[in-house]
Amino acid sequence: MRIGNAIRIISATRLCVVACLLAILVVALQFLYAPVVAQGVSPNIVFILTDDQRLEDIAHMPRLNKLLIEHGMSFSNYFSSVSLCCPSRASILRGQYAHNTGVLTNSSDSGGFSKAHALGVENSTVATWLHDHNYKTALIGKYLNHYPGSLGPEYIPPGWDYWASSVLGNPYSEYNYTLNENGKQVQYGGEAGDYGTDVYAKKAVGFIKDCTTQNKPFFIYLAFYAPHGPATPAPRHESLFADAKVPRSKAFNEADVSKKPQFIQRLPLLTEKEIEAADTYYGKRLRSLQAVDEAIESICNTLDETKQLENTYIVFASDNGFHLGEHRMRRGKMTAYETDIHLPLIVRGPGVRHGVRAEELAGNIDLAPTFAEIAGAKVPDFVDGRSLLPILRGDAGLDKNWRKVFLVEHWAKGADPSSGNTAPVPHKLSSNCCHNLTACAGNCAHLVKCCCENLSFGCDTGNGGYSGSPAAAVQPGGMDSSCIADKVMEEPDDQIAQTDPEMRDKGTRPSNEEYTPPAPPAARTTHPGRRRRRKRSRSGELSGIPEFHGLRAKGSTYVEYSTGEREYYVLKDDPDEITNIAGTPNVDKKSSESAKDRVEKLKMSAGAAARALEDGH
Ligand SMILES: [Ca+2]
């Protein structure tokens, strides 16, 4: 019995040892692979979003490369579904394609802040999900275009514990703007210390320190305006990139566009002066990004000092891309070409492998569900996107089951995706809206009368201009002070943005896409040289990008335009999208019909059904 008892005791001891070892192993594996670390504290998230940044611009951000790319994962195939600020930002907040957020454009009846607000988009966003999951949430910088609309300068959307976003002035210029800081209006002027990117970075640093003191997990949505036009650099960076040139890919000033859609065929080759202007603007954009690069360093340093760096996901992305001479397009976005949709996405954080490139197709609709899973928050069923956390963890066998296509779109103003008929619908008139704003574009006198309920202008000066509040004063050399709207100035994002780079470089058109106050007529007639330049640049104006819907696969882009035109590029052989093979014998009829069918279904689908279509089911 004694021997038997001893054997049982030894066996039990062995079992205990084995069990303990297994437990230790499990714990060790959790530390190695689990995304959530550091004594059960939920990981923090710092989401840094730039505005209109091209993919290759990141090569000129050394701190981003050192601190995020080398210590994290870069996505080689990350895209914006709609290459335009407000639709992309609404998709980021909700994890939905634009046809499901209902925010299709930057303004008018089909987009902008007011549309998003009216649709209730703000009532369930990544901010509300994380806020309800015990996170401290902060939005610092640019929100949805035309915020705050008629809601007033104290309005803060649901879910945000800390709020600092512009409600007045010209934040795109980085100077002379007013922020709604948690309900209080704070003015920033034209001094070096008012430079927007630096102001936003300091606020993010302060928020991190405050949350650390309170021992709360935090989510920061830090949205810089750089390098969006006018792409104002910080004074300390003004001498950099003096000789920068737009990369001369085959797409730059494309020689033969005869197989491309009409809106491209209409464009003449860039002149030498236009090429020079594109290079100048390219350098300016890179200069404006240097303060963002420094902000990344200051945020990493703060996270390190507060011992949060190892428990924080830092996510860097751009809302949409930008073309600058490619395919003869002078400057702008909104097309399905790589310059406009293919964006940087870089993630550093707990469990994320270092220096790795992910090839899976990812998009702006994936950010919200990714942040939700990191935080352990529930994702609503309406979400179309999918969490990227399995990719960040390096889960095996993902590629086979991952999405095969991502929807890319451009919407006409007034489009109604819910009807299935995406042709523009008439502008709806309200008692406060005299008529279609677009018809008033470029005429200050009409603009004063053309007051939609979500806009408030200053007084008619009687000379074709109108005055705004002192807070809306613009920086020296900026737009004519007699033509200021008493609201946030928005850079034109529409096709009109394509024209006259010289004027916009000088910040003379810091306005909204539908109502662009011109300089007083008298000033124009005294400068015949400028008039000649305007005429020439207009000859290269990109006008009327037709509505389109298409698919970006890992190796190809397929686009259908409302004109009936199509484009299909095989990117492995043709990364610059020179040879359009749509409708040629190189594309068999069956695969073409299959792509068309998938586009038609995907542009009307939501949630799990949309994901199934992306997966090819
Ligand atoms: Ca943008």
Image (spheres, rainbow, N blue to C red):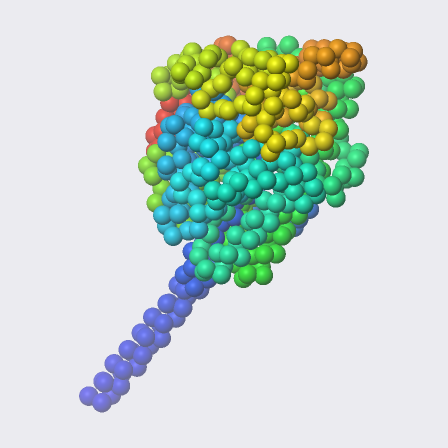
Viewer-proximal residue, 19 or 47?
47
Q: Against 309, is 494 above or below?
A: above
Q: Which residue is drawn at 37% across and 50% down?
A: 133
Q: Residue at x 44, y 37 (%)?
A: 155
Q: Residue at x 51, y 24 (%)?
A: 456
Q: Position of residue 603 (x, y in %)?
A: 41, 23
**From this viewpoint, which residue is outermost toward the left?**
1
Q: Position of residue 481 (x, y in %)?
A: 66, 25
In which quarter of the view is residue 381 placed?
top left
Res. 483 visible in picture: yes
Viewer-proximal residue, 529 or 294?
529
Res. 339 visible in picture: no
Viewer-proximal residue, 232 or 103?
232
Q: Where is residue 363 in the image (x, y as percent from the top left)?
A: 49, 35
Viewer-proximal residue, 560 or 202?
202
Q: Quarter holding the C terminus?
A: top left
Judged left or right of residue 283, residue 461 is left
Judged left or right of residue 521, residue 398 is left
In which quarter of the view is residue 157 placed?
top left
Q: Quarter holding the N terminus?
A: bottom left
Judged left or right of residue 381, residue 188 is right
Q: Where is residue 272 in the image (x, y as percent from the top left)?
A: 79, 19
